[in-house]
Amino acid sequence: MTDQLKEIVYSKDAIEFVTVAVQYCVFLENFEEIQETELTDKLTKLLPLLYLKASLVPETDTVNEDAPEISVTEEDYNYIVFKLYDVYLTNDAYLEVFLQDMKYSETPITASISEDLADIYQDLKNFITIFERGVTENMNDALYVCMENFKTYWGQKLTNVLRALHSLKYAIGNDGFGDDSEQDDKNDKNELW
């Protein structure tokens, strides 16, 4: 059983996922005095890689009776949220369309870039904290929980927030983001006709 677990937790795909998860968490914990454009640029590169690596992790099942421990405290979570919110400020809220409640709502539902990124951070940090201790059974269970949460929770958050970040990054006239020349060409053509 232990050899089978080792094949999963030490597989190339699991290790690559762990590597990207660590990069994501370390980045969110340590960025200082960063502009929105730089943060958005980094996240729009890191999030798709994280999604790809998570989708390649081999299937596993739990072996321990107890659920893996939670290491991210409310203070840790709030620290990440406020740190991100301080950068995004007025651009933090975006319209959410992939919520089950949306089909019953008459008003738009908003989500928060900073909260979505912190939600992803929380699951990944809980996972890597256990994984780095090197106890195979616990690593396996943490991987299982993280992948189940990816399928049901943070994977959707990731794709939703990536959509919002993409919009910020490539919005025309947004502090150097986007390509204004393409819009200028369209305006010039419209003026000709």
Image (cartoon, rainbow, N blue to C red):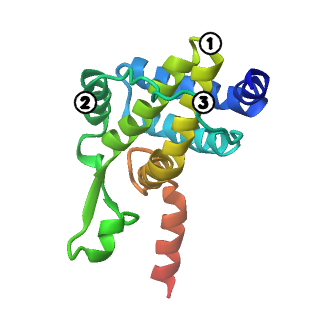
Residue identified by numbered label 1: 134
Asked if one can make out residue 170 in the rendered structure from this viewpoint, the answer is: no
The CA span between labels 3 and 2 is 37 Å
Q: Quadrant where the N terminus lies?
A: top right
What SS does tag 2 mark? helix
Q: Mark 3: which amino acid?
A: Val
Instruction: Decide which of 125, 5 is in the foreground and name it.
Output: 5
Seen at 49% across and 66% down, the residue is: 183
Is residue 34 shown above or below 51? above
Instruction: Decide which of 187, 91 is in the foreground and name it.
Output: 91
Residue identified by numbered label 3: 63
Counting residues from the start of the chain, the first of labels 3 and 2 encountered is 3
Does the CB distance between marks 1 and 3 fall below 8 Å? no
Residue identified by numbered label 2: 82
Seen at 38% across and 50% down, the residue is: 174
Label 2 vs label 1, nearer the camera: 1
Does the CB distance between marks 3 and 2 fall below 8 Å? no
Asked if one can make out residue 3 in the rendered structure from this viewpoint, the answer is: yes
Percent position of residue 160, x then y: 44, 54
* Residue 66 as seen in the image, left or right of residue 91: right
Seen at 24% across and 40% down, the residue is: 89
The CA span between labels 1 and 3 is 15 Å
